[in-house]
Image: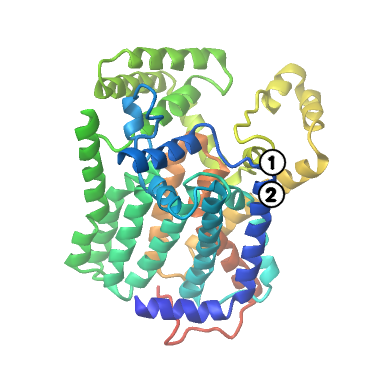
C-alpha cells in the first residue's frame, strides 16, 4: 500500500497539467449546475435524499417519505452507501451544492486515478496531452452526473480503485483485499453490481490455479458475496423477503418486459406492464409481489423472445454509442426531461422527410455535436477492442477489464445509455490513450523502472 501511494505521488507530481484541466472542466459544470439548478431527478435523487433524511431521523435507509404510508419495496430499493455519503456530508453542510462540490472532487480524483492506472499498466503517457483529453469533450455525462444527486460518480470511483488494487495484486497478492473491499463498496452503492460478487471468487480461483494468488486470496474473494448475503438477510428481517434490492424487479418489468412487448410509448406495451404491476400490487406481502411481478414479466419476455433479444442487442450497442442527449437535456433543460416523440415516430408519419423536419427542430450545433459524439464513441469502441488484445498489457488485467465490461454491458441490457457507461469510462479512456501511444508512439521518458511496475504478459 505504501509503495502504491509513493508511485501515485511520483506520477501526480509530473501531471499537474492534467489535474488543472480536469479541475477547470468540473468547475465549469459546477457553475452551470448552480445557474440552472437542475441537480435532482424526481425518482432516483428523491429516493437518495429520503434515505439520507431517514438515516438521520430514524436510523433506516428506507428510500421513501417516512411520513407517508410505507411501501415495502422502498426498504431495499437503494443500497445504503450513497445515502450514507450524503448523510455524513450533511454534518458539515446541509446545502446540496456542498455535496455536489465533494462529488466533483471525487470525479476529478477518479479520472486522475484512471490515468495513473494507465501509467502503471504501460509506464507511458502521451506527449500530445490535449489530444489525450478529447474523450472528455465527447463525454459530458461525466461532468453532468458529478453535479446531480446521483450515485454514479461514487460508483465509478470505487470501480477504478478496485482496478488499481487488482493490478497491484498481480505482484503483491495482499493487495487483492483492497480490490474486494472496493468491489463491496461499489455493490453497496449501486445494486446493478451485486451479482458480480459471484464473479469475484471465480476470478480468484482462476488466478489461484495460475499460482498468482494463494488460498488466502480465494477466501478473501468471498467478502463481496458475504456482504450481499448479509444485506439480503437484513432485508428478509425487515420485509420477510430474502433479496438484495427491489430495483431489480422494477428494472426487469418496466424495461425488459416492456421492450419485449413494444417500443417506448407503445400504448399496448404500457397497458400490459401496468396490468402486471397492478396484479402484483394486490399480493399480500413483498415476496408474493416480487414473485408475481417477475413471473408475469418473464412470461411476457418468453412470449416475445425475438423482440426481447433484439432489444437487448440494441441496448448493448447503445451502451457504447449513445451520444448522451438525454443527459444534456436533463442538465440544461429539465432533470425529468421525457422525449414524447422521437425520429421513429416522424419516420412512420412522413418517411425521410419527416425525420429531416424533426432534426430541423434542434439547434444545428447540437446536432453536429451529437453526431460527432456518436462517431467518436464508435472509434473509442474500436480502441477498446484493440486495448483488450494489447500484448503489452498484463493478461490478468485484461481479463478483469473484460469481465467487468461484459458484466456491466449485459446487466444494464435493454437500457444501454451513456450514464451506465460511466462505470467503465475509465477503461474506455485508457483504451484511447493506449491507442494514441501505440499508433503515434508519443511517449515521454517515463519508462518502466523499479518505481514503475512493468506490465507482464
**The disc label shown at residue 195, or none:** none
Q: Describe the element under mark 2 as helix, strand or loop.
A: helix
Percent x, y for residue 256?
44, 28
Q: Are marks 1 and 2 in contact (CB under 8 Å)?
A: yes
Residue at figure coordinates x 27%, y 71% from the top left: 173
Residue at figure coordinates x 76%, y 42% from the top left: 366
Classify the position of the N terminus by image quarter.
Answer: bottom left
Nearest the viewer among 449 and 314 is: 449
Badge nearest the viewer, 1 or 2: 2
Locate residue 434: give its quadrant.
Answer: bottom right
Seen in the picture, residue 396 relative to 155 is either above or below; the reply is below
Q: Is residue 392 visible?
A: no
- Residue placed under numbered mark 2 in the picture: 32
Nearest the viewer among 441 and 140 is: 140
- Residue placed under numbered mark 1 in the picture: 332
Locate residue 278: give its quadrant.
Answer: top left
Q: CA distance from mark 1 to mark 2?
A: 8 Å
132 left or right, relative to 165: right
Q: Is residue 360 visible?
A: yes
383 left or right, relative to 207: right
Amino acid at each position: 500500500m505504501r509503495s502504491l501511494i509513493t508511485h501515485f505521488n511520483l506520477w501526480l507530481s509530473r501531471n499537474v497539467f492534467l489535474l488543472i484541466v480536469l479541475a477547470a472542466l468540473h468547475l465549469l459544470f459546477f457553475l452551470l449546475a448552480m445557474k440552472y439548478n437542475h441537480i435532482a431527478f424526481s425518482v432516483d435523487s428523491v429516493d437518495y435524499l429520503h434515505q439520507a433524511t431517514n438515516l438521520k431521523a430514524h436510523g433506516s435507509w428506507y428510500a421513501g417519505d417516512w411520513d407517508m404510508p410505507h411501501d415495502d419495496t422502498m426498504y431495499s430499493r437503494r443500497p445504503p452507501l450513497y445515502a450514507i455519503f450524503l448523510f455524513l456530508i450533511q454534518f458539515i453542510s446541509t446545502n446540496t451544492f456542498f455535496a455536489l462540490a465533494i462529488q466533483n472532487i471525487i470525479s476529478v480524483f477518479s479520472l486522475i486515478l484512471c490515468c495513473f492506472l494507465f501509467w502503471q499498466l504501460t509506464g507511458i503517457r502521451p506527449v500530445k496531452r490535449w489530444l489525450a483529453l478529447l474523450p472528455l469533450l465527447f463525454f459530458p455525462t461525466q461532468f453532468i452526473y458529478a453535479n446531480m444527486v446521483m450515485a454514479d460518480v461514487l460508483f465509478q470511483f470505487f470501480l477504478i480503485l478496485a482496478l488499481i488494487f487488482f493490478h497491484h495484486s498481480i505482484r503483491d497478492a495482499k493487495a487483492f483485499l483492497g480490490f474486494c473491499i472496493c468491489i463491496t463498496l461499489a455493490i453497496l452503492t449501486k445494486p446493478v453490481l451485486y451479482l458480480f460478487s459471484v464473479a469475484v471468487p471465480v476470478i480468484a480461483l482462476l488466478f489461484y490455479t495460475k499460482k498468482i494468488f494463494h488460498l488466502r486470496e480465494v477466501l478473501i474473494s468471498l467478502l463481496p458475496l458475504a456482504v450481499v448475503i448479509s444485506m439480503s438477510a437484513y432485508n428478509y428481517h425487515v420485509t420477510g423477503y430474502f433479496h438484495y434490492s427491489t430495483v431489480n424487479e422494477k428494472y426487469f418489468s418496466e424495461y425488459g418486459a416492456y421492450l419485449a412487448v413494444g417500443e417506448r410509448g407503445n400504448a399496448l406495451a404500457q397497458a400490459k406492464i401496468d396490468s402486471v404491476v397492478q396484479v402484483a400490487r394486490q399480493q399480500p406481502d413483498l415476496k408474493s409481489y416480487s414473485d408475481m411481478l417477475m413471473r408475469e414479466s418473464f412470461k411476457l419476455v418468453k412470449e416475445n423472445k425475438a423482440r426481447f433479444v433484439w432489444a437487448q442487442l440494441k441496448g448493448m450497442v447503445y451502451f457504447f454509442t449513445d451520444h448522451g442527449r438525454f443527459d444534456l437535456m436533463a442538465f440544461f433543460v429539465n432533470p425529468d426531461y421525457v422525449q414524447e416523440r422521437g425520429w421513429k415516430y416522424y419516420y412512420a408519419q412522413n418517411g425521410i422527410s419527416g425525420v429531416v423536419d424533426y432534426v430541423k427542430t434542434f439547434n444545428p450545433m447540437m446536432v453536429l455535436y451529437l453526431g460527432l459524439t456518436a462517431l467518436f464513441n464508435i472509434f473509442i469502441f474500436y480502441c477498446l477492442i484493440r486495448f483488450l488484445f494489447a500484448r503489452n498489457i498484463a493478461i490478468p488485467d485484461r481479463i478483469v477489464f473484460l469481465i467487468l465490461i461484459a458484466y456491466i454491458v449485459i446487466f444494464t441490457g435493454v437500457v444501454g445509455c451513456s450514464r451506465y457507461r460511466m462505470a467503465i469510462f475509465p477503461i474506455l479512456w485508457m483504451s484511447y490513450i493506449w491507442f494514441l501511444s501505440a499508433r503515434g508512439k508519443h511517449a515521454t521518458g517515463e519508462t518502466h523502472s523499479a518505481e514503475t511496475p512493468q506490465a507482464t504478459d
